[in-house]
Image (cartoon, rainbow, N blue to C red):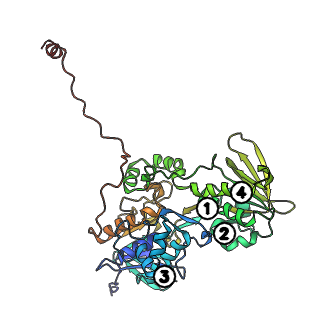
Amino acid sequence: MDNPQPDPHDLLGVGIGPFNLSLAALADQVGGLDALFCEARAEFRWHPGMLVDGARMQVPFLADLVSLVDPTNPWSFLNYLRDQGRLFPFYFAERFQLPRREYDHYCRWAAERLVNCRFGTAVTALHWSAEHELFRADTTGGEVWARNVVLGTGTSPVHPEPFAALRGHPAVWHSAHYLDRRRTLDGARDITVVGSGQSGAEVFLDLLRTRGADGTRLRWLTRTRALAPMEYSKLGLEHFTPDYTRYFHTLPAEVRDQLVAAQWQLHKAASAETLAEIHDHLYERTVGRPVDADPVEIMPGTAVTEALAGPCGGFELSCRHTDSGAEHVVRTDAVVLATGYRAVRPAALDPIAELIDWDEHGRYRVDLDHRVATRPQLTGGLYVQNAELHSHGVGTPDLGLGAHRAAVILNAVAGRTVHELPARTAWTSFAAPAPTAVLPRPQEGNRAATATR
């Protein structure tokens, strides 16, 4: 007896972070499209460990869930402000960048109201049914069938290899847990922050504010040779446009990998404002005292090569100075690793892993519609969000491209143009111009005849 034909969703989203939430918000307004988004957590949370007082977004408020694609969408940030009765306060605040806490609250406002979002429902396994030509998802809420799947499972904190021996130690943890574990630092008299990005700068600044007066030694180590600010010039920001994404996608894989590493200042550096706040704070607290009177160390160009528990308590960090090659040991009581995040393949993909066409490094091959390349027998659409840095460039994790990417995926899933997207979004031309046709040179006789006329 044949198995009954399941009733599938057009689209199943696995994970609900800002990017899949953007897709859910846009899909909510498309008639006839049946979409469901599942998230294992009980509620929406966006980097809760880094919602430090005073921390601001690094993108303008228009980089919300929908506005850069559809500013009339009811899930826009401005509509959120209207709903919260905050339009006039926001107007008078005259700030283009939102407090992080407000962005998190806005996303939770949308997530709690979108009927296509289901929290407390983990997708534990994805299968491909050749019989029905559909995905079957095993979830904690039962079986779900879908024609297309979008992976939006986010990124995971990076714990550098030199700290492998201290993994799980209660005094060495990632900045993703900063607010949850900040109080565990109360007994430490020497605290080291590792990492040069925005999280490292914000953690160091917060420690300066909260521990700066009690004599605690605060140290900031970064591998980068300088605490250079994030590139924020208007033309430089055009690297975060669909134009640059399309250009980057055309490059050979080895060139793309080199570019991502070289462009760290576009997407991994700290903001100039945060670096200025750190300097201002240090300047004001040393009034009337020598600069070196403060127990503060800022050490760029310093790589931690090994981290071990010290023989008398605390930790010993073996360090190498990048420029000179000189080695030294740092002794500290606690370490906060502001060492970034990376995309991790979700375990739910294991049942269909052999049906995915991985590249030579075990990464997704992703086309311009953000669809993952699969073996011919898997005919459904498998899409990814924020797992294609290697193929789509520095704009991949940027919230400013979130709505555009969601619209591209939505158009592909719907099989029609749900959202008209601009053909040109940057003044900059990133690709080399097409070769100029070489005209034949005139013959000598013709030139001579022309010269006598």
- Please name the residue shown 71% across and 68% down the image: 168
The residue carrying mark 2 is 178
Compare marks 3 and 4 and give the one earlier in the sequence: 3
The residue carrying mark 3 is 139
The residue carrying mark 1 is 199
Q: Residues within 10 Å of mark 4 (few under 14, many from 20)?
A: few
- Please name the residue shown 40% across and 72% down the image: 23
450 w.r.t. 163: above or below: above
Residue type at mark 1 is: Ser
Relative placement, left or right, of 188 versus 371 is: right
Q: Quadrant of residue 34?
A: bottom left
How many angstroms separate mark 1 from mark 4 (CA)?
23 Å
358 w.r.t. 411: above or below: above
The residue carrying mark 4 is 284
- Please name the residue shown 51% across and 55% down the image: 361
Residue type at mark 3 is: Thr
Compare marks 1 and 2 and give the one earlier in the sequence: 2
